[in-house]
Image: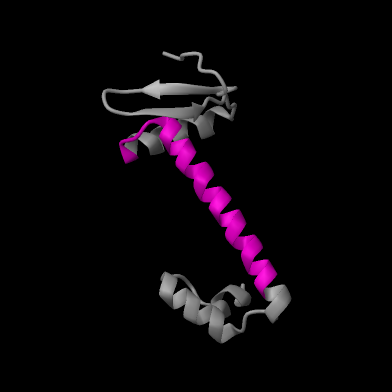
Amino acid sequence: MPRDHPGLGLHTIVCDMTVCMQVDRLSVTMDPELGQAVRDAAARSGISVSRWLSQAASDHLRNELLGAALEVWEAEQGPFTDDELDAAARVLGVSGANSRRAS
């Protein structure tokens, strides 16, 4: 149950048996099919929809920051070579630069 706490603004204190944490409650809208897919994915993962959406948002933000960092790197050092991209792809276990450029 939300409690008023000076200085927390729009955040809410959520407590369970051992942990209290500050959270930011949001309301989201989405297409019904997407909403069902999210609920199904959360259920498959064994987590709440809130936690699943939080993890998805965190992943998206991390990817945006990584993309920005790579853009800065390339602006300063020049574009990555195919060899560099292929080496990174091998480490990550994904397709290499040449297969991406062929499409």
State the image coordinates of residue 38 (x, y, percent, origin top left): 46, 35
Q: Which quadrant does the C terminus fall into?
A: bottom right
| Left or right: 8, with 47 as reference point | right
State the image coordinates of residue 61 (x, y, percent, origin top left): 57, 49
Q: Main secondary structure of the magenta part?
A: helix
Residue at point 27% right, 27% down? 18
| Left or right: 63, with 89 as reference point | right
Question: From what the image shows, is residue 77 above or below residue 59?
Answer: below
**Residue found at the very far right of the displayed protein:** 75
**Residue found at the very far front of the displayed protein:** 6
| Left or right: 30, with 20 as reference point | right
Q: Quadrant of residue 45?
A: top left
State the image coordinates of residue 53 (x, y, percent, origin top left): 48, 37
Residue at point 38% right, 36% down? 42
State the image coordinates of residue 68 (x, y, percent, origin top left): 65, 61
> In the image shown, does 102 or 44 lie closer to the viewer?
44
Q: Quadrant of residue 41?
A: top left
In the rendered image, residue 39 lying in the magenta stretch gets the answer no
In the rendered image, residue 61 lying in the magenta stretch gets the answer yes
Residue at point 49% right, 43% down? 56
- What is the image's colouring? one colour
How many numbered callouts? 0
Q: Which quadrant does the N terminus fall into?
A: top left
> In the image shown, does 82 or 17 lie closer to the viewer?
17
Question: From what the image shows, is residue 29 above or below residue 37?
Answer: above
Query: In the rendered structure, which segment of residues is drawn in magenta?
Result: 45-73
Residue at point 50% right, 49% down? 59
